Amino acid sequence: MNGLDPVLCRLSAMPHLAESAAKSGALAAAQSALRLSRHLVPVQTGRLRASLAAVSHPAGAALTADCPYAASVELGTRYSPARPFMMPALRGTDYARILSQFLREVLR
């Protein structure tokens, strides 16, 4: 059939394109959560805020804090109350909207 080859070629590339869009969308969502967590993190010296990062990995992306006391601030200890900044940022990020934007680009 005339004109079918470009369509078949595009369809064969869809799984790779969708996977790439999902990974890009996951990283964009993690970066969105990163921006929000930087506003929520309690600051004394700035070390904890500076250690926050959005990183890509094979399963998608993650929001990380590379500061030794990040978990103590987020979760609290028996001596100090929790001052969460990562979980509220993760909850406040609209992952579905961000991922759907990237997937829509693939389907165009």
Image (tube, helix red, strand yellow):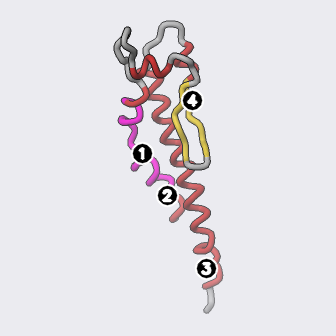
The residue carrying mark 2 is 103
The residue segment tinted magenta is 88-104
Kind of element beneath mark 1:
helix
Q: Report the mark closest to the observer, 1 or 3.
A: 1
* Residue 22 relative to residue 80: left or right: right
Residue farthest to the bottom? Answer: 1
The residue carrying mark 4 is 53
The percent coordinates of residue 90 (x first, y second) are 41, 35
What is the distance, in whole Å, between disc 1 and disc 2 at their CAs? Answer: 12 Å
Circles 1 and 2 in contact, beta carbons < 8 Å: no
Corner quadrant of residue 21: bottom right
The 10 Å Cα crowd at callout 4, few under 14, some 14 to 19, many 20 or more, is: some
What numbered label is drawn on residue 8?
3
Q: Residue 64 colored magenta?
A: no
Q: Report the mark closest to the observer, 3 or 4.
A: 4
Corner quadrant of residue 64: top right
* Residue 97 relative to residue 56: left or right: left
The three-letter code of the residue at mark 4 reads Ala
What is the distance, in whole Å, between disc 3 and disc 2 at their CAs? Answer: 19 Å
What is the distance, in whole Å, between disc 4 and disc 1 at their CAs? Answer: 17 Å
What numbered label is drawn on residue 95?
1
Q: Mark 4 or 1 closer to N-term?
A: 4
> Which residue appears at 58% of the width and 24% of the height?
66
Q: Report the mark closest to the observer, 4 or 2.
A: 4
The three-letter code of the residue at mark 3 reads Leu
Q: Mark 1 or 2 closer to N-term?
A: 1
Q: Is residue 6 above or below residue 95?
A: below
What is the distance, in whole Å, between disc 1 and disc 3 at their CAs? Answer: 31 Å
* Residue 41 relative to residue 50: left or right: left
Q: Mark 3 or 2 closer to N-term?
A: 3
The percent coordinates of residue 95 (x first, y second) are 42, 45
